[in-house]
Image (spheres, helix red, strand yellow):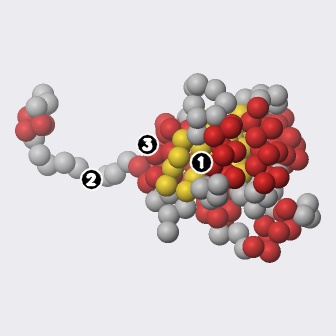
Amino acid sequence: MKHKVLLLDDNNESILPSLGNSFSAETYEVVLGENAQKAIEKSDAGEIDLLVMNFNSPTDEGWEAIDEITEENPFLPIIVITRQPELRNLAEAAGACAFVEMPVDVPTLLQTIRELLAEPAQRRMERVCNRPTDFRQVPPAEGSFRDQLDRRYTTSYRFNTPASRWGLNE
């Protein structure tokens, strides 16, 4: 069974479609959220296994959405992505399981997702009951997001077909 990951952003300049492609390559079913209300609805309906939210402001409606989601579905793992490291405590207090600073370290983020989805029920229960748990903080990556994708998904395979066959000039 594929795990379903909902990606939600609070602005128009989103990295989430690119992350969604990386998640799809890792066999996750990806749903791009339109807004915080849609995230709440999908969470309440039990349609998602993990929520990834990109925030750029401490006053966004997304923080209220996290409160509602964790109230209705406290076992849902939530990852907060932001350019603002000072939002870490707010993310943890809101019930997020992980805090990711931009630029996103994609391999580490994917590992964090795997760990959260494999988290035993007992650990999730401890997290919900506000007992100390392993809140995850992913530091910013070195290099741009595109550079990371290029390193991760570039093949060393050489095409032996002449470029002219594909309509390209050699």
Q: Few, some or many C-alpha atoms within 10 Å of disc 1 (few <14, some 14-19, many ≥20)? A: many
Residue ID at (91%, 60%): 130
Determine the secondary structure under disc 2.
loop
Q: Nearer the viewer, residue 61 or 44?
A: 44
Marks 1/2 in contact by CB < 8 Å: the verdict is: no
**Residue indicated by mark 2:** 157
- The three-letter amino acid code for the residue at tag 1 is Leu
Determine the secondary structure under disc 1.
strand
Quadrant of the rendered structure where residue 65 is?
Answer: top right
Instruction: Please state which of the two labelled residues, at mark 1 or mark 3, is closer to the viewer.
Output: 1
**Residue indicated by mark 3:** 150
- The three-letter amino acid code for the residue at tag 2 is Tyr
Q: Nearer the viewer, residue 45 or 113?
A: 45
Q: CA distance from mark 3 to mark 2?
A: 14 Å
The percent coordinates of residue 135 (x first, y second) are 81, 56
**Residue indicated by mark 1:** 6
Marks 1/3 in contact by CB < 8 Å: the verdict is: no
- The three-letter amino acid code for the residue at tag 3 is Asp
The percent coordinates of residue 120 (x first, y second) are 72, 73
